[in-house]
Amino acid sequence: MEYKYRFSVVIPVYHVADYLAETLDSVISQDIGFTEHIQVILVNDGSPDDSESICLSYQKRYPHNIVYVKQENAGVSAARNHGVKYVEGK
């Protein structure tokens, strides 16, 4: 099986606007080569804060690497499991 990315990172998002940009910047700055090797799947679990606008901003900057998915609040495990459906990395 051929994979599009070496790694896929599923990030459940709920009430984390204060930390989300720092988290994404950390993943993006890895020296493995973000645009070539890393996919990020952001799963908004019905977050009531500004997390959605941050997710959309990063997705717009990296449309080939960042997938944004929104769901009603169902908990961190449900968000992570939902995100796994979008994995394209090894």
Image (cartoon, rainbow, N blue to C red):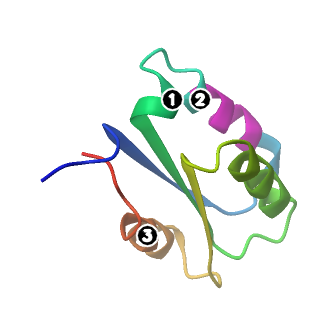
Residue 6 against residue 14 in the figure, above or below: above
Mark 1 or 2 closer to N-term?
A: 2
- Name the foreground residue: 76 vs 36: 36
Residue 28, numbered circle: 2
Q: Amino acid at mark 1?
A: Phe
The stretch of residues the image draws in magenta is 20-26
Looking at the image, residue 68 lies above or below residue 82: above
Left or right of 71, for residue 46: right
Query: Which image quadrant is residue 78 in?
Result: bottom left
Please state which amino acid type lies under the numbered disc 3: Ser
Expressed as whole percent of the image width and height from the top left, the position of residue 13 reads 64, 60
Q: Distance of mark 1 from mark 3, alpha carbons?
A: 25 Å
Residue placed at 35% from the left, 40% from the top?
7
Residue linked to disc 1: 34
Marks counted in the figure total 3
Residue at 65% across, 43% down: 62
Measured in 3D between alpha carbons, the distance from the residue under mark 3 to the one under mark 2, in whole angstroms, is 24 Å
- Of the 4 image quadrants, the one containing the C terminus is top left
Q: Which residue is mark 3?
A: 77
Q: Is residue 1 magenta?
A: no
State yes or no: residue 21 in magenta.
yes
Q: Earlier in the sequence, mark 1 or mark 3?
A: 1
Label 1: few (<14), some (14–19) or many (≥20) C-alpha neighbours in 10 Å? some
Q: Secondary structure at mark 3?
A: helix
